[in-house]
Amino acid sequence: MIASAPWVVVLLGTALLVVMLVVAVLSFRGPERPTQSALAPPMSLPIPAAADTPAPEESPNSPSGPNSPSPPSSASPAPSGSSAQPAVPSRTASAAAPSAPGGAPTSSAPEEPVSATDTGEVAVSYKVLNEDGSSFRARLVVSNGSGESTDWRVELRFTGDVTGISASSGPGVSVTIKDRGWYLLSGTRPLDAGSQQTVQLRFSRTGGGEYPTLCTINGSACAVG
């Protein structure tokens, strides 16, 4: 039966040859290489800006120029019907000069009178004791700081408001009226060394001026207090 069908033999031989060829091809073929994966996209890092990069120029239409409009003020306008009260300046009360009864002004005395016995020679101090509208009383203390007896003469000048004078003293005193408010006083005898003489004075006046504008003893200035 096989001999009567030669095509079957041919078919089997052909199939065997194909199988052997496939085995030979597979045996000489190298190992398969793994498929290379697709490359990942490259990474890009941010580049820092340079320190000396110039600042961007302002646009000519920028509102920050000198002629740019200022922002609207947030202050609300004062309600109509209300008026601002002006500030009243404070007043500092000025010290008024003391005045004698009857409205007559008085003159001030020096703050620190000099002692009459510190000069080492004849000296005098003048002090107002009391006053009223038409007169005042004062006291002269003459001191001889020298080493010998000496005469003394006091010159007093007041404003024209002083019109008269009267003086009294234990050892005695002489008064000479030179003019209205101008008087010369002197002891009736020399003043002993190291001693004092007190003269009580009473002046009449029509205004102020109980402190003299000039007071000297033997040409030297008095201590007025």
Image (tube, helix red, strand yellow):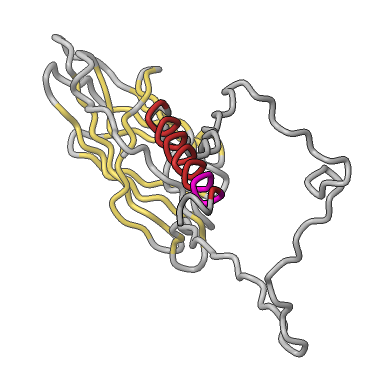
Does 10 appear in magenta?
yes
Task: Decide which of 53, 225 is in the foreground and name it.
Answer: 53
Q: Is residue 41 above or below residue 7?
A: above
Q: In the image, residue 224 lies at what x, y percent?
A: 34, 35
Does 25 appear in magenta?
no
> Residue drawn at (28%, 37%), measured in percent from left and top?
140
> Residue drawn at (32%, 45%), measured in percent from left and top?
201
Q: In the image, residue 74 lies at what x, y percent?
A: 68, 70
Q: In the image, residue 78 lies at what x, y percent?
A: 72, 80
- Residue 10 visible in image: yes
Q: In the image, is 153 to the left or to the right of 209?
A: left
Q: In the image, residue 15 lies at what x, y percent?
A: 48, 45
Q: Main secondary structure of the magenta part?
A: helix
Quadrant in which the C terminus is drawn: top left
Write the start and end of the magenta stretch as one range.
7-11
Q: In the image, is 2 to the left or to the right of 63?
A: left
Q: Is residue 75 above or below residue 116?
A: below
